[in-house]
Amino acid sequence: MRLTRQTNYAIRILMYLAAKPDRLSRLGEIAKSYSAPEPFMFKILQPLVAAGMVETVRGRGGGIRLARDASDINLREVVELTEEGFSMAECFESGSDCPLIHSCELNSALREALNAFLSTLGRFTIADLTKNKAYLHRTLGIDSEIAA
């Protein structure tokens, strides 16, 4: 299974925001730190805001920040929000014409594997990914007084 670029960058946006929890960020600075186009990042930001993971602050000096604590946002939640589907094989899709659909062990095995994958992601949070804030600050070019 391969996650989409959208999921990858959604996690990156959340990590960036978690790395500087006490300050607002601008989407442009996040896009620049990851060498990603700002319009693409804006498209990814919208579902994160709608899901209550990120909040926007309007006006002069506005920006974005995590809407919840980084330890309250798990990877499963992000992946399920940003991935369009989990069809690992044609038989996962509705309307499949496979005659074995109700008795196929491949379908059972893949479904069990997918459940294990999602369950594992549910054990990890954005906070888990951002424990080394000093490294993130250096690597992403975040100038901050709170590098630890």
Image (spheres, helix red, strand yellow):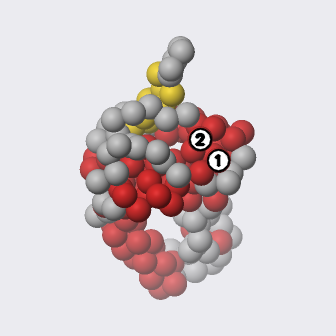
Indicate the position of residue 48 as horizontal and vertical percent values: 49, 39
Q: Residue furthest top?
A: 59
Indicate the position of residue 43 as horizontal and vertical percent values: 65, 39
Disc 2 on helix, strand or loop? helix
Q: Is residue 120 left or right of residue 54?
A: left
Q: Is residue 80 left or right of residue 116?
A: right
Pick the quarter of the image with the C terminus: bottom left
User: Does the rendering let one see residue 145?
Assistant: yes
User: Does the rendering let one see residue 7?
Assistant: no
State how far apart marks 2 and 1 are (Cα).
Answer: 5 Å
Q: Residue at x 41, y 72 (%)?
A: 117
Image: 116 above or below 74: below
Question: Which residue position holds label 1?
Answer: 32
Quadrant assignment, res 3: bottom right
Q: Residues within 10 Å of mark 1 (few under 14, many from 20)?
A: few
Q: Residue furthest bottom?
A: 105
Q: Residue at x 72, y 46 (%)?
A: 37
Indicate the position of residue 56 as horizontal and vertical percent values: 48, 26
Indicate the position of residue 113 as horizontal and vertical percent values: 43, 77
Q: Residues within 10 Å of mark 2 (few under 14, many from 20)?
A: some
Residue 29 got which mark?
Answer: 2
Picture mark count: 2
Q: Residue at x 54, y 15 (%)?
A: 60
Quadrant assignment, res 124: bottom left
Q: Is residue 55 left or right of residue 27?
A: left
Q: Nearer the viewer, residue 90 or 76?
A: 76
Disc 1 on helix, strand or loop? helix
Image: 139 above or below 54: below
Residue 5 got which mark?
Answer: none
Look at label 2 and name its amino acid. Answer: Glu
Question: Mark 2 near mark 1, Cβ–Cβ under 8 Å?
Answer: yes
Look at label 1 and name its amino acid. Answer: Lys
